[in-house]
Amino acid sequence: MSLQLLIILAYFAITLAVGFLAKTKTRSATSFHGAGLGVLMVVVVGVGEWLGGTSTTGIAEYGFIAGLSGAWYTIANGIGVMVLALFFAKFYRSLDTVTVPGIVEKFLGLRARTVASVLLIFVMIAVGTAQVIAAGTLGVSVLGLSYHASVIILGLGFIVYTLAGGMTAVGYTNLLHLIAMYGGAVLAVAFVLGDIGGLASLKSHLPAHPYFSWTGIGWSAISSWIIASILGACTAQAGIQPILAAKDVRVAQQGALITALLVAPFGILTALLGMAAKVRFPELANAKLALPTLMMHLHPVVGGIVLASIMAAILSTVAPIILAAGTMFTKDLYQRLWRPAAGDQQLLLVSRLSTGAAGLLCLLLALLMYGSTRILDMVYFAYTIRGSLFVILLFAIYWRRTSPQGAVYGMIVTALAGFFWVFYKSQFGRYPLHPDFTETYAALVVAVLSTVLLSFVDKRPERQHASQTPNP
């Protein structure tokens, strides 16, 4: 058994132990979903939503292909969380709900909440499945396990510790993951740059453009990431849930601001690793393997620590995602629609069952979709849904003429348009209208047009606002 494998297995065992320690603090549905969180817990749970497999192996792949500009992925996420912190955290807290669909209901009614919940649960499952696939791929390339064994072992692990302690378990384990992620990334950059002769040597081996240009990956990709991140951050249940569960508004805003500052620069480290991999292994056929390949050629202890940090990034995202899916099912569907009078212990049971079901569904889809590009299509489609829901919510907040029925149909029409855009790209290798008119832009346009037109068609009187409009 290799030293790298021993380090990763030890880290996984520590993660499970930390998750189970949280079980003693989770005795009610409220504590399972999160309540009275301090700044540290808000930060570590929030960071977990944004720093996952894409922020490590994904950005290293961009770094291998296009250089530093791949870091715009986490910079864009940081910008999105900053907008959430400055303009919406306080407002969302004032609405007294623990879910994004609950916020939607305040302005657009129960039907809109139900539709939004179904769509956002799909988003969580799609993103969670992508992370489980990343975990399975890590197991194949690094641990020497079969893909199916990797998915089952790692997948059941994160499901078990999330079910054991809920939000507390996610917070405790994500604190461990955050330390591992940043510590591993800094350690890796230091060792790798040392091996190749420093930053000056890296610059001498790679062309200035695109590798050292902040726009090397293209303005279309950068602008699309920023827009999608701003829209997505303001409707991402996994990222917003700790803000809604913070003990007060000040903690919520501070936690979100610190989250943004921690998320934004992380991609610079992993992009540098991808660039170093380009220097060390210029003939590497699959850029997706840039980071694992680089780590396997480091000192075994250093490589093992960094590979454990990659697994930490994946686990830190999956746990809050399945918890978010379970929370929305319990609060927005089960309690709101079917069992309004359900007691706390019944809600705790449903929360655990629905969270576990979300995790198992991610695991099953990961097993079925291994090696398929369809998972990426599903994730892109999921992101268009999340962003377009925020556009429709903005109309509901600021435009009194927004029709609840028009908004519901707008959600459905936008989802269908997003699906068509992604499906068309997967079949023909290009977007329907223009190469730069991505699914993000298509969803924005359709969300705006459908909400406005359908609201004008609805002749009912203007609705009343549920609360004040947001302000910093």
Image (spheres, grey):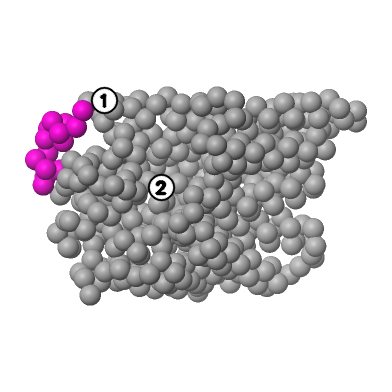
Disc nearer the start of the sequence (1/2):
2
Spatial distance from mark 1 to mark 2, Cα to Cα? 23 Å
Determine whether, in the image, residue 203 is placed left or right of residue 216. Answer: left
Residue shown at the point (9%, 40%) measured from the top left: 197
Q: Nearer the viewer, residue 320 or 68?
A: 68
Q: Secondary structure at mark 1?
A: helix
Where, by quadrant of the figure, is residue 298 drawn?
bottom left
Can the viewer see residue 270? Answer: no
Q: Which label number is shown at residue 54?
A: 2
Which mark, residue 209?
Answer: 1
- Going by the numbered disc 1, the residue's amino acid type is His
Instruction: Assess disc 2: are there few (<14), some (14-19) or many (≥20) residues with their C-alpha within 10 Å of its C-alpha.
Output: many
Look at the image and tell me whether residue 212 can be seen: yes
Image spot of residue 405 (x, y percent)? 82, 38
* Residue 309 in the image, given as x and y percentages of width and height: 31, 57
Q: Label 2's element?
A: helix
Specify start and end residues of the magenta stretch as a single range: 193-207
